[in-house]
Image: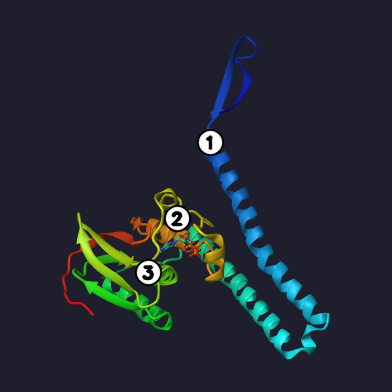
Amino acid sequence: LRVRGCTLRWNGNDRQGILLVFYDMTQLRKLENFRRDFVANVSHEIKTPLTVIRGAVETLQDGAINEPESARRFMEIISTHSERLNNLVQDILSLSLLEYRASGEGYDLVNCDLSLPLASAVKLEQPRAEEAGIRLVTEIEANPQVRIDVQLIEQAVVNLIDNAIKHSGEKSEIRIRLHTEDGNAVLSVTDRGCGIAPEHVERLFERFYRVDKARSRKAGGTGLGLAIVKHIMQLHRGSAEVRSRPGEGSTFLLRLPIVKSGCASGAS
Ligand code: ADP
Protein backbone atom coordinates (compact mmCIF):
# COMPACT_ATOMS: atom_id res chain seq x y z
CA LEU A 1 0.00 0.00 0.00
CA ARG A 2 1.41 3.44 -0.92
CA VAL A 3 0.19 6.49 1.02
CA ARG A 4 0.61 10.05 -0.13
CA GLY A 5 -0.26 12.98 2.14
CA CYS A 6 -0.28 16.75 2.05
CA THR A 7 -1.39 19.58 4.27
CA LEU A 8 -4.30 21.72 3.09
CA ARG A 9 -5.17 25.23 4.12
CA TRP A 10 -8.35 27.02 3.29
CA ASN A 11 -10.17 30.22 4.25
CA GLY A 12 -6.83 31.98 4.46
CA ASN A 13 -4.65 30.39 7.15
CA ASP A 14 -7.07 29.67 9.95
CA ARG A 15 -8.31 26.22 8.84
CA GLN A 16 -6.02 23.30 8.14
CA GLY A 17 -6.41 19.66 7.23
CA ILE A 18 -4.48 16.72 5.92
CA LEU A 19 -5.35 14.89 2.73
CA LEU A 20 -4.24 11.26 2.62
CA VAL A 21 -4.47 9.22 -0.61
CA PHE A 22 -4.09 5.42 -0.42
CA TYR A 23 -2.96 3.53 -3.51
CA ASP A 24 -3.35 -0.24 -3.68
CA MET A 25 -0.14 -1.31 -5.44
CA THR A 26 -0.84 -5.06 -5.46
CA GLN A 27 -2.20 -5.22 -9.01
CA LEU A 28 0.42 -2.83 -10.34
CA ARG A 29 3.26 -4.86 -8.78
CA LYS A 30 1.75 -8.07 -10.12
CA LEU A 31 1.58 -6.56 -13.62
CA GLU A 32 5.18 -5.31 -13.36
CA ASN A 33 6.42 -8.77 -12.28
CA PHE A 34 4.35 -10.42 -14.98
CA ARG A 35 5.84 -8.19 -17.70
CA ARG A 36 9.38 -8.64 -16.39
CA ASP A 37 9.00 -12.45 -16.36
CA PHE A 38 7.46 -12.40 -19.84
CA VAL A 39 10.33 -10.36 -21.33
CA ALA A 40 12.90 -12.63 -19.60
CA ASN A 41 11.14 -15.73 -20.96
CA VAL A 42 10.85 -14.36 -24.48
CA SER A 43 14.54 -13.34 -24.49
CA HIS A 44 15.54 -16.81 -23.35
CA GLU A 45 13.30 -18.50 -25.93
CA ILE A 46 14.80 -16.34 -28.72
CA LYS A 47 18.41 -16.72 -27.56
CA THR A 48 18.42 -20.52 -27.57
CA PRO A 49 17.60 -21.09 -31.28
CA LEU A 50 19.68 -18.03 -32.30
CA THR A 51 22.76 -19.49 -30.58
CA VAL A 52 22.22 -22.80 -32.38
CA ILE A 53 21.76 -21.04 -35.74
CA ARG A 54 24.91 -18.95 -35.24
CA GLY A 55 26.89 -22.05 -34.27
CA ALA A 56 25.71 -23.91 -37.39
CA VAL A 57 26.54 -20.96 -39.69
CA GLU A 58 30.05 -20.66 -38.18
CA THR A 59 30.66 -24.41 -38.61
CA LEU A 60 29.57 -24.15 -42.26
CA GLN A 61 31.87 -21.16 -42.79
CA ASP A 62 34.75 -23.06 -41.20
CA GLY A 63 34.63 -25.67 -43.95
CA ALA A 64 31.60 -27.93 -43.30
CA ILE A 65 29.96 -26.34 -46.36
CA ASN A 66 32.41 -28.28 -48.57
CA GLU A 67 31.33 -31.66 -47.19
CA PRO A 68 27.88 -32.42 -48.63
CA GLU A 69 26.71 -34.63 -45.74
CA SER A 70 27.76 -32.15 -43.01
CA ALA A 71 26.41 -29.22 -45.05
CA ARG A 72 23.02 -30.94 -45.33
CA ARG A 73 22.93 -31.64 -41.59
CA PHE A 74 23.78 -28.07 -40.58
CA MET A 75 21.30 -26.62 -43.09
CA GLU A 76 18.63 -28.81 -41.50
CA ILE A 77 19.55 -27.51 -38.04
CA ILE A 78 19.28 -23.91 -39.30
CA SER A 79 15.90 -24.66 -40.90
CA THR A 80 14.47 -26.34 -37.74
CA HIS A 81 15.53 -23.52 -35.44
CA SER A 82 14.37 -20.77 -37.82
CA GLU A 83 11.00 -22.53 -37.87
CA ARG A 84 11.03 -22.48 -34.07
CA LEU A 85 11.70 -18.73 -34.04
CA ASN A 86 8.93 -18.22 -36.56
CA ASN A 87 6.44 -20.20 -34.41
CA LEU A 88 7.45 -18.17 -31.37
CA VAL A 89 6.92 -14.82 -33.12
CA GLN A 90 3.54 -16.02 -34.47
CA ASP A 91 2.39 -17.08 -30.99
CA ILE A 92 3.58 -13.85 -29.34
CA LEU A 93 1.70 -11.88 -32.01
CA SER A 94 -1.43 -13.99 -31.43
CA LEU A 95 -1.23 -13.32 -27.68
CA SER A 96 -0.78 -9.57 -28.04
CA LEU A 97 -3.62 -9.43 -30.57
CA LEU A 98 -5.81 -11.27 -28.05
CA GLU A 99 -4.87 -8.75 -25.36
CA TYR A 100 -5.87 -5.93 -27.68
CA ARG A 101 -9.12 -7.72 -28.44
CA ALA A 102 -9.79 -8.11 -24.71
CA SER A 103 -10.64 -4.40 -24.80
CA GLY A 104 -13.65 -5.44 -26.90
CA GLU A 105 -12.30 -4.39 -30.29
CA GLY A 106 -11.08 -6.20 -33.36
CA TYR A 107 -13.00 -9.40 -33.21
CA ASP A 108 -15.90 -10.68 -35.11
CA LEU A 109 -18.66 -12.27 -33.04
CA VAL A 110 -21.42 -14.22 -34.81
CA ASN A 111 -24.09 -16.68 -33.71
CA CYS A 112 -23.32 -20.11 -35.11
CA ASP A 113 -23.30 -23.86 -34.43
CA LEU A 114 -20.26 -24.91 -32.44
CA SER A 115 -19.75 -27.81 -34.86
CA LEU A 116 -18.57 -25.25 -37.45
CA PRO A 117 -15.16 -24.35 -35.93
CA LEU A 118 -14.83 -27.94 -34.71
CA ALA A 119 -15.16 -29.32 -38.26
CA SER A 120 -12.70 -26.82 -39.74
CA ALA A 121 -10.14 -27.46 -36.96
CA VAL A 122 -10.38 -31.23 -37.52
CA LYS A 123 -9.93 -30.71 -41.27
CA LEU A 124 -6.83 -28.58 -40.66
CA GLU A 125 -5.28 -31.12 -38.29
CA GLN A 126 -6.18 -34.24 -40.33
CA PRO A 127 -2.92 -34.32 -42.39
CA ARG A 128 -0.77 -33.96 -39.25
CA ALA A 129 -2.73 -36.74 -37.52
CA GLU A 130 -2.40 -39.05 -40.55
CA GLU A 131 1.33 -38.38 -40.70
CA ALA A 132 1.58 -39.43 -37.03
CA GLY A 133 -0.61 -42.53 -37.63
CA ILE A 134 -3.36 -41.16 -35.38
CA ARG A 135 -7.11 -41.33 -35.98
CA LEU A 136 -9.29 -38.29 -35.24
CA VAL A 137 -12.80 -39.31 -34.15
CA THR A 138 -15.52 -36.67 -33.97
CA GLU A 139 -18.61 -37.19 -31.78
CA ILE A 140 -21.35 -34.58 -32.05
CA GLU A 141 -23.89 -35.36 -29.34
CA ALA A 142 -25.39 -31.87 -29.41
CA ASN A 143 -24.76 -28.91 -31.63
CA PRO A 144 -25.53 -25.79 -29.57
CA GLN A 145 -25.59 -22.26 -30.90
CA VAL A 146 -22.86 -20.08 -29.48
CA ARG A 147 -21.78 -16.50 -30.04
CA ILE A 148 -18.17 -16.70 -31.14
CA ASP A 149 -15.37 -15.44 -33.32
CA VAL A 150 -15.22 -18.58 -35.49
CA GLN A 151 -11.53 -18.22 -36.37
CA LEU A 152 -10.48 -17.80 -32.75
CA ILE A 153 -12.41 -20.85 -31.53
CA GLU A 154 -11.00 -22.81 -34.48
CA GLN A 155 -7.51 -21.74 -33.36
CA ALA A 156 -8.21 -22.92 -29.78
CA VAL A 157 -9.40 -26.34 -31.02
CA VAL A 158 -6.42 -26.63 -33.41
CA ASN A 159 -4.04 -25.96 -30.50
CA LEU A 160 -5.68 -28.69 -28.41
CA ILE A 161 -5.70 -31.28 -31.22
CA ASP A 162 -2.11 -30.36 -32.07
CA ASN A 163 -1.05 -30.98 -28.45
CA ALA A 164 -3.01 -34.24 -28.33
CA ILE A 165 -1.17 -35.44 -31.46
CA LYS A 166 2.21 -34.43 -30.01
CA HIS A 167 1.58 -36.34 -26.79
CA SER A 168 -0.05 -39.48 -28.24
CA GLY A 169 1.66 -42.63 -29.44
CA GLU A 170 1.37 -43.98 -32.96
CA LYS A 171 -1.87 -45.85 -33.89
CA SER A 172 -3.59 -43.91 -31.15
CA GLU A 173 -7.02 -42.28 -31.31
CA ILE A 174 -8.09 -38.73 -30.42
CA ARG A 175 -11.76 -38.05 -29.63
CA ILE A 176 -13.19 -34.61 -30.30
CA ARG A 177 -16.58 -34.44 -28.63
CA LEU A 178 -19.32 -31.84 -28.59
CA HIS A 179 -22.04 -31.95 -25.94
CA THR A 180 -23.88 -29.75 -23.45
CA GLU A 181 -23.58 -29.63 -19.66
CA ASP A 182 -25.26 -27.35 -17.11
CA GLY A 183 -26.49 -25.00 -19.83
CA ASN A 184 -23.06 -24.68 -21.44
CA ALA A 185 -21.68 -25.96 -24.70
CA VAL A 186 -18.71 -28.24 -24.08
CA LEU A 187 -16.10 -29.14 -26.64
CA SER A 188 -13.57 -31.71 -25.47
CA VAL A 189 -10.40 -33.22 -26.92
CA THR A 190 -9.36 -36.56 -25.40
CA ASP A 191 -6.13 -38.39 -26.08
CA ARG A 192 -4.69 -41.66 -24.84
CA GLY A 193 -1.23 -40.21 -24.54
CA CYS A 194 1.26 -39.81 -21.71
CA GLY A 195 -1.08 -37.82 -19.44
CA ILE A 196 -0.04 -35.07 -17.03
CA ALA A 197 0.95 -35.40 -13.34
CA PRO A 198 -1.40 -33.52 -10.93
CA GLU A 199 1.33 -31.08 -9.80
CA HIS A 200 1.59 -29.70 -13.35
CA VAL A 201 -2.11 -29.51 -14.19
CA GLU A 202 -2.76 -26.17 -12.44
CA ARG A 203 0.06 -24.37 -14.23
CA LEU A 204 -0.44 -25.70 -17.78
CA PHE A 205 -2.26 -22.60 -19.03
CA GLU A 206 0.54 -20.25 -17.89
CA ARG A 207 2.74 -18.72 -20.57
CA PHE A 208 5.87 -20.78 -21.27
CA TYR A 209 4.96 -23.47 -18.74
CA ARG A 210 5.97 -26.90 -20.02
CA VAL A 211 6.09 -30.24 -18.27
CA ASP A 212 9.03 -31.43 -20.33
CA LYS A 213 10.87 -28.48 -21.91
CA ALA A 214 13.17 -30.55 -24.14
CA ARG A 215 10.30 -32.63 -25.50
CA SER A 216 8.13 -29.58 -26.15
CA ARG A 217 10.93 -27.78 -28.04
CA LYS A 218 11.77 -30.90 -30.05
CA ALA A 219 8.13 -31.11 -31.13
CA GLY A 220 8.27 -27.45 -32.24
CA GLY A 221 6.28 -26.17 -29.24
CA THR A 222 6.57 -22.59 -28.01
CA GLY A 223 4.97 -23.10 -24.58
CA LEU A 224 2.29 -20.55 -25.50
CA GLY A 225 -0.38 -22.78 -27.10
CA LEU A 226 -2.49 -23.26 -23.97
CA ALA A 227 -2.06 -19.64 -22.84
CA ILE A 228 -3.57 -18.66 -26.19
CA VAL A 229 -6.45 -21.13 -25.63
CA LYS A 230 -7.13 -19.63 -22.18
CA HIS A 231 -7.17 -16.08 -23.56
CA ILE A 232 -9.53 -17.05 -26.37
CA MET A 233 -11.94 -18.63 -23.90
CA GLN A 234 -11.81 -15.59 -21.58
CA LEU A 235 -12.70 -13.36 -24.53
CA HIS A 236 -15.81 -15.50 -25.05
CA ARG A 237 -16.73 -15.57 -21.33
CA GLY A 238 -16.04 -19.27 -21.42
CA SER A 239 -13.39 -21.41 -19.75
CA ALA A 240 -10.75 -24.03 -20.45
CA GLU A 241 -9.85 -26.91 -18.16
CA VAL A 242 -7.96 -30.18 -18.18
CA ARG A 243 -8.51 -33.61 -16.65
CA SER A 244 -5.66 -36.02 -16.86
CA ARG A 245 -4.25 -39.28 -15.55
CA PRO A 246 -0.53 -39.93 -16.00
CA GLY A 247 0.00 -42.88 -18.29
CA GLU A 248 -3.64 -42.95 -19.44
CA GLY A 249 -4.21 -39.69 -21.30
CA SER A 250 -5.81 -36.28 -21.00
CA THR A 251 -9.05 -34.49 -21.76
CA PHE A 252 -9.05 -30.74 -22.43
CA LEU A 253 -12.48 -29.11 -22.17
CA LEU A 254 -13.67 -25.79 -23.57
CA ARG A 255 -16.91 -24.40 -22.14
CA LEU A 256 -18.97 -21.70 -23.82
CA PRO A 257 -22.32 -20.14 -22.93
CA ILE A 258 -25.14 -21.34 -25.19
CA VAL A 259 -27.07 -18.68 -27.12
CA LYS A 260 -29.92 -20.76 -28.50
CA SER A 261 -30.16 -24.53 -28.28
CA GLY A 262 -30.00 -26.46 -31.53
CA CYS A 263 -29.55 -30.12 -32.06
CA ALA A 264 -27.96 -32.58 -34.37
CA SER A 265 -26.51 -36.01 -33.95
CA GLY A 266 -24.03 -38.31 -35.54
CA ALA A 267 -20.46 -39.53 -35.30
CA SER A 268 -17.71 -39.88 -37.86
P1 ADP B 1 3.75 -26.40 -26.10
O1 ADP B 1 4.11 -25.50 -27.20
O2 ADP B 1 4.94 -26.82 -25.27
O3 ADP B 1 2.92 -27.56 -26.54
P2 ADP B 1 1.39 -25.57 -24.67
O4 ADP B 1 1.09 -24.30 -23.96
O5 ADP B 1 0.51 -25.94 -25.81
O6 ADP B 1 2.90 -25.49 -25.10
O7 ADP B 1 1.35 -26.74 -23.61
C1 ADP B 1 2.06 -26.57 -22.39
C2 ADP B 1 2.53 -27.92 -21.89
O8 ADP B 1 1.40 -28.70 -21.49
C3 ADP B 1 3.25 -28.78 -22.92
O9 ADP B 1 4.62 -28.44 -23.02
C4 ADP B 1 3.04 -30.17 -22.35
O10 ADP B 1 4.00 -30.41 -21.35
C5 ADP B 1 1.67 -30.07 -21.69
N1 ADP B 1 0.59 -30.64 -22.52
C6 ADP B 1 -0.26 -29.93 -23.31
N2 ADP B 1 -1.15 -30.74 -23.91
C7 ADP B 1 -0.86 -31.99 -23.48
C8 ADP B 1 -1.44 -33.30 -23.74
N3 ADP B 1 -2.48 -33.45 -24.55
N4 ADP B 1 -0.86 -34.36 -23.12
C9 ADP B 1 0.19 -34.21 -22.28
N5 ADP B 1 0.76 -33.01 -21.99
C10 ADP B 1 0.24 -31.92 -22.59
Where does label 3 land, which residue?
A: 157
Where is residue 19? Give x, y as percent: 57, 21
Query: Which residue is depicted at the point 64% across and 75% down?
Result: 82
| Type of the residue with mark 3 | Val
Q: In the rendering, which numbered label is found on residue 26? A: 1
Q: Quadrant of the N terminus?
A: top right
Of the two numbered discs 1 and 3 in the rendering, the one whose residue sits closer to the viewer: 3
Of the two numbered discs 2 and 1 in the rendering, the one whose residue sits closer to the viewer: 2
The vertical placement of 237 against 59, above or below, is above
**CB of mark 1 near ligand 1 (< 8 Å):** no
**CB of mark 2 near ligand 1 (< 8 Å):** yes
Which one is in front, 115 or 220?
220
Q: Quadrant of residue 102?
A: bottom left
How far apart marks 1 and 3 lie (CA) works out to 34 Å
| Type of the residue with mark 1 | Thr
Query: Which residue is depicted at the point 59% across and 68% down?
Result: 89
Secondary structure at badge 1 equals helix
Say left or right for 141 vs 70: left
